[in-house]
Amino acid sequence: MRFLLHALAGCVSLAVVACSDDETKPPAADGGHEHEHPEPNFFVSSDTSATGNLGGLDGADARCQTLADAADLHGTWQAYLSTEPLEGAEGVDARDRIGDGPFYNVNGAKLADDVDALHAIPGDAELFITEAGDKIPGQWEGSPAGVVHDILTGTGPDGRVLEGMTCANWTSESADLAAQVGHSDGLGPAMNAMAPFNSWHSSHPNGGCNDTAPRGGAGHIYCFKP
């Protein structure tokens, strides 16, 4: 009898310890399996540029890198911008500056698996967000006032340079030149989601390289970690 009582007391003690341990560990949302957050390799710049003069590709890349470093995003970052063959320089296609994919934003949401798939999706305010995780004001429902969803790219629908639409390779502030822009939210006036308004990278020319604001811009750029 004495042996049985000792055994029962031991079982109760083990059960209390087990319950105590369980109570200190909240259950995982997926039933006990923890997943690492996908490493981000894309964001929309939170900063802006009043003109199309970004200091060339080097200046735009430096913007992306500075923002990434400040947000504690590791690696080397580059701007999604195309350039054309001017003054003996070779042109560059934006699609060749971003790596192979898959592409994830800073919230861990996947945009696309590869480069072709990325260029086939429309803009989306929930996906095309800044390094701080903020949406860009645009035509989406509930957006703050002030549409600035025009993102500088200089790029055609296929992700390659659209010649004459690069602000002289991102060095000009001329009102006689323009830049091709995309819509980060994939929407045009009155929430129009038809092409070309739905393109995140090639919707229409902006108002001029002297001022990125007309037609709905602020000089934002896309940044990728290849």
Image: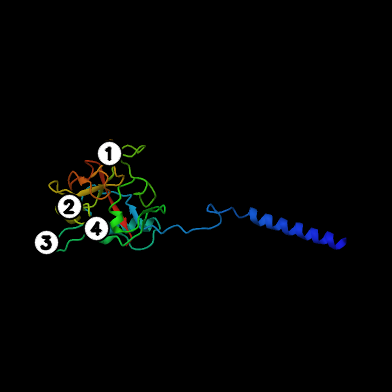
Looking at this view, name the residue that lies furthest to the right: 1
Dot label at residue 192? 1
Q: Are marks 4 and 1 in contact (CB under 8 Å)?
A: no
Label 3 sits on residue: 87
Q: Are marks 4 and 2 in contact (CB under 8 Å)?
A: no
Pointer 3 local density, CA inside 10 Å: few below 14, some 14–19, many at least 20: few
Dot label at residue 167? 2
Camera-near label (2 vs 1) is 1
Between discs 3 and 1, the one toward the N terminus: 3
The disc labelled 2 sits on which kind of residue? Cys
Note whether 32 is above or below 141 in the view shown.
below
Dot label at residue 218? none
Label 4 sits on residue: 94
Pointer 1 local density, CA inside 10 Å: few below 14, some 14–19, many at least 20: some
Note whether 92 is above or below 29 in the view shown.
below
Q: Residue at 39% across / 58% down in the picture?
A: 73
Camera-near label (3 vs 4) is 4
Separation of residues labelled 2 and 1 (CA atoms): 27 Å
Where does residue 202 sit, x and y in percent of width and height? 23, 49
